Image (cartoon, grey):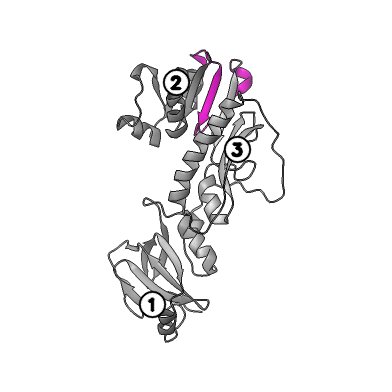
Amino acid sequence: MRTYLFVGNRRFVLQKMLEKGLHFAAIGYVANSHLENDLKSKKLNIEPKLLKRLENKTQVLEFIKAHTFDVFVSNGCPYILPLNDLQKAIYINIHPSLLPDLRGYDPVIGAILFGRDSGATCHIIDQGVDTGDIIAQVKIKNTKDLDVTTLYQLSFYAEQEAFEEALKRDFQPQRKQISQDNLIEYRRNNADMVISFNEDNEQIIRKIKAYNNKKIGCSFVCQGHTYKVFHAEIMENPYLLHILDQFDEGQVAFSYEDSIIFKKDSQVLRFSGIVSLDGSPITLSTILFSK
């Protein structure tokens, strides 16, 4: 029976490992992570003696060196491991993208922002960042109905499937990662969270969908006041379009509840989930931007 050592920041692959009855040497969880919160709320039933809270790279390396294991599983371990200094074992990582595309810290956000297919990849850990040979992959096709919160949930499910397939393959690599010219590596960027209205409409919607997590959102400035927006869509109702013909581009035609409707680039956009950072409302006929 193989012995596993896990280090990560989310519960889903770990949950699948527990369901399959795999034998653990220990389970390390990244401090202040979603996994730590899930452990505190008892979403996973794990013997406390197996658990170790890890606050930094030094603690991660000490944790690895303190245990004997056959397979090391990383699922959100934020550190590059010095493999040459560690015991011989199978070292794998489960990453939420179709590697080699969307390497890096925020692949799920990047998939929405750039309209890329995504998914999950189980790969061998090597000396690079998300560069090791691929064991298994699960694809999530990019569609316009996805936003980042939904794609995160799909990615977690895909990570479980990728791990399960890798387990069936006994963690044997299937192919190397092939370099391509159009690959993206993405890390969240403050500029991508700001709507300037200089973007085209599709890019505005992608920005908002990429950052519509309730703790983030995109911001825009109107009449000297800053607002957060969490949802955006293009409206196509014929009667609504008829009404908007009476308004200038960038002029608010409807303002109700947490939503506004306005025209931009000859299309009608609705922003919803709007939050004013200082409590100032956006009133009818307000000019959001001018051409």
Of callouts 3 and 2, which one flags the residue occurring earlier in the amino acid sequence?
Answer: 2
Amino acid carrying label 1: it is Val
Estimate how packed mark 2 is, as few (under 14), some (14 to 19) or many (20 or more) residues with alpha carbons within 10 Å. Answer: few
Tell me: residue 138, above or below residue 269: above
Question: Magenta includes 36?
Answer: no
Label pair 3/1, CB-CB below 8 angstroms: no
Q: Foreground residue, 228 or 89?
A: 89
Question: Magenta includes 86?
Answer: yes
Find residue 92 and report its image quarter: top right
Q: Position of residue 220 (x, y in %)?
A: 42, 65
Asked whether residue 264 is in view, the answer is yes
Residue occupied by mark 1: 252
Label 3: state its secondary structure: strand
Amino acid carrying label 3: it is Gln
CA–CA distance in space, label 3 to label 1: 45 Å
Residue occupied by mark 2: 21
Estimate how packed mark 1 is, as few (under 14), some (14 to 19) or many (20 or more) residues with alpha carbons within 10 Å. Answer: many
Nearest to the eye among marks 1 and 2: give it: 2
Q: Position of residue 125 (x, y in %)?
A: 61, 28
Residue occupied by mark 3: 137
CA–CA distance in space, label 1 to label 2: 58 Å
Label pair 1/2, CB-CB below 8 angstroms: no
Q: Which residues are magenta?
A: 65-87
Q: Position of residue 248 (x, y in %)?
A: 45, 83
CA–CA distance in space, label 3 to label 2: 23 Å
Of callouts 1 and 2, which one flags the residue occurring earlier in the amino acid sequence?
Answer: 2
Asked whether residue 33 is in view, the answer is no
Find residue 217 and report its image quarter: bottom left
Of callouts 3 and 1, which one flags the residue occurring earlier in the amino acid sequence?
Answer: 3
Q: Position of residue 238 (x, y in %)?
A: 44, 80
